[in-house]
Image (tube, rainbow, N blue to C red):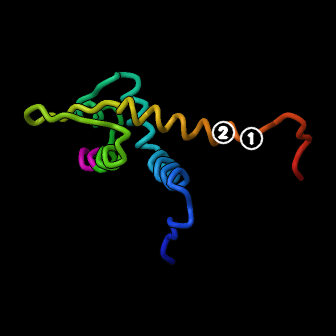
């Protein structure tokens, strides 16, 4: 497999691709949806909620945290996670800008 040439693309395009990659796994979507619904969560709750192994949940949480989609705090042996509000707004803006570029008016079909 070749080397990714991220330098050919804008910072926005690279960031959008990273976020889309994080959203590409159904377990991560389920984690995000659970965090949105509860507005906070302890790591153990996710194991019960999703039915996945603790190690698997931890891997997905690490990926989401590395991209700053979620943020967390350590309290004893428990980790509490929530959506990072500033990053969430940034992600929302990136996707809205992309989706808003499509202009449906006057289009009969492209093919």
Residue 56 shows in this picture = no
Query: Label 2: which residue?
Result: 99
Q: Nearer the viewer, residue 44 or 110?
A: 110
Provide the residue span drawn in magenta. 54-58
- Mark 1 nearby-residue class (10 Å; few <14, some 14–19, many ≥20): few
Q: Position of residue 69 (x, y in %)?
A: 38, 39
Q: Tell me if label 1 and label 2 are in contact, CB under 8 Å.
A: yes
Q: Nearer the viewer, residue 17 or 6?
A: 6
Q: Which mark is residue 102?
A: 1
Q: Which mark is residue 58?
A: none
Q: CA distance from mark 1 to mark 2?
A: 6 Å
Q: Position of residue 73 (x, y in %)?
A: 19, 34
Query: Is residue 72 shown left or right of residue 8?
Result: left
Residue furthest out toward the top: 38
Looking at the image, is 49 positioned above or below residue 65?
above
Badge 2 element: helix
The residue depicted at 70 percent of the width and 41 percent of the height is 101
Badge 1 element: loop
Q: Quadrant of residue 68?
A: top left
Task: Say whether residue 33 is magenta.
Answer: no
The residue depicted at 55 percent of the width and 40 percent of the height is 94
Q: Nearer the viewer, residue 48 or 23?
A: 23
Looking at the image, is 110 positioned above or below residue 38?
below
């Amino acid at each position: 497999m070749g080397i990714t040439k991220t330098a050919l693309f804008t910072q926005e395009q690279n960031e959008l691709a990273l976020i889309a990659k994080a959203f590409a796994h159904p377990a991560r979507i389920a984690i995000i949806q659970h965090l949105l619904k509860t507005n906070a969560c302890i790591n153990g709750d996710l194991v019960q909620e999703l039915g996945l192994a603790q190690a698997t949940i931890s891997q997905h949480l690490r990926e989401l945290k590395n991209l700053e989609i979620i943020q967390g705090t350590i309290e004893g042996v428990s980790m509490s996670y929530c959506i990072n509000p500033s990053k969430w707004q940034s992600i929302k803006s990136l996707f809205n800008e992309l989706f808003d570029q499509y202009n449906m008016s006057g289009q009969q079909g492209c093919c």
